[in-house]
Amino acid sequence: MTSTDVRRSPDPAQVTTAMRAVYVAFIGAGFAFASWASRIPQVRDRLDLDPAALGLVLLAIAAGSVIALPLAGTLIGRIGSRATVIVMALVLAAAMGVIAVGSVTSVAVLTAGLFVMGLSNGAWDVGMNVQGAVVERHLRRVVMSRFHAGFSLGTVAGALLGTAMVALDVPVPAHLAGVAVLVTVVVPLTTRGFVPDVDTDPDGVPVERVSALASWREPRTLVIGVVVLAFSFAEGTANDWLAVALIDDHGTSATAGTLGFALFLTAMTLARWFGGSLLDRYGRVPVIRLLAGLAVVGLLLFVFGPTPVAFLGALLWGAGASLGFPTGMSAAADDPAKAAARVSVVASIGYCAFLAGPPLIGLLGQQVTVLRALTVVAVLLGVAVLVADSLRPPAGTPDEQV
């Protein structure tokens, strides 16, 4: 461990403060991303992008994230999760300013801003998940799904704000610039409350860190990454294409399309907030398999049902896709000594969905419409069902679940 952030275990008050700070980090990340995602249809129209071109533009943010994620573990090891999240929040806010300009000027400027946003978002994501795992171990209870519910709450707030901005005809640059200022002020101030990335467990026993490279050779970690990838694809595809599909293929208004996206995010948020009790009662494996099936049902209703049914499909899709990512993060963090490295690896694999998803759906959308292209999501969720046993904690792990 090269970080100088090495201290004794924090007291309960510090852990409570850190828990609140982690919530703010997750909420802030979700709010910033959904603020951008809620305006994709308007940016698409302003820059006259067809589905294939839009998919390639959206690829920039995923590419930035995928590049950052494998490096995030090393960065966190050097400067700690607190400094990582603070710095990356400031970089992301600056990137949103560039995106605001690019949304009305050129595809090149927009793509550059999205790439930097992806870089900062990727490292921010790993940093807040590592801190979330630290807090979870100190609390000795499962809270990761609620942290991710915080992310979803942020996305709901961002989507609803975006809906209001569309309805009020507020220009995209003004909207995104305002969000950038808010992120700059709130997130760095709050995340100062993070506790150190522990070098001791809650009982004061030293924890030896391992390298992320070693975790890339662990079969269980890699398969957990596949589960997270499938659910990330289900979530990320909705983020990028749900509103577009409602507007273009279901024939809704721009406001209704954005509202459908908000419904998806609302269902995801509620399921993440209350899903922890299901995991405690039934275990990771059966719950994740059940939710994958629910997401597939919702997706099929969204694709093949009439427009009113499509909104119901969006709700089921959101609920079904809700717990895959946070449960994968918890599974990666089962062993405290390897949590940071494994979280980095699993997040890196999961974010490959955001790299492949936008261009894949965009290119398929050129041939069979965006709506029909979304059925690809069901295939990946089927794979997740088959390999969900990897989420089961190893024998002898604390809080082992069936």
Image: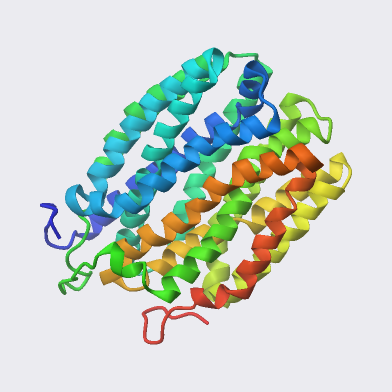
Residue lying farthest right? 306
| Residue 196 visible in the displayed image | yes
**Residue 260: which quarter of the image?**
top right
- Seen in the picture, residue 232 relative to 185 is either above or below; the reply is below
**Residue 131: which quarter of the image?**
bottom left
Q: Nearer the viewer, residue 326 or 376?
A: 376
Is residue 344 toward the left or the right of residue 289 in the image?
left
Q: Nearer the viewer, residue 229 or 93?
A: 229
Count of numbered badges drawn on the protein? 0
Is residue 279 toward the left or the right of residue 221 in the image?
right
Q: Residue at x 61, y 20 (%)?
A: 165
Q: Residue at x 45, y 25 (%)?
A: 179
Q: Residue at x 63, y 31 (%)?
A: 54
| Residue 19 visible in the displayed image | no
Residue 72: percent from left, percent from top? 31, 50
Residue lying farthest bottom? 395
- Seen in the picture, residue 209 relative to 237 is either above or below; the reply is below
Q: Nearer the viewer, residue 263 or 140?
A: 263
Q: Residue at x 53, y 29 (%)?
A: 36
| Colouring style | rainbow
- Seen in the picture, residue 86 relative to 377 is either above or below; the reply is above
**Residue 92: which quarter of the image?**
top left
Residue 217: percent from left, percent from top? 36, 72
Residue 207: percent from left, percent from top? 19, 71
Is residue 395 toward the left or the right of residue 315 in the image?
left
Is residue 231 toward the left or the right of residue 86 in the image?
right
Quadrant location, the N terminus: bottom left
Residue 123: percent from left, percent from top? 35, 45
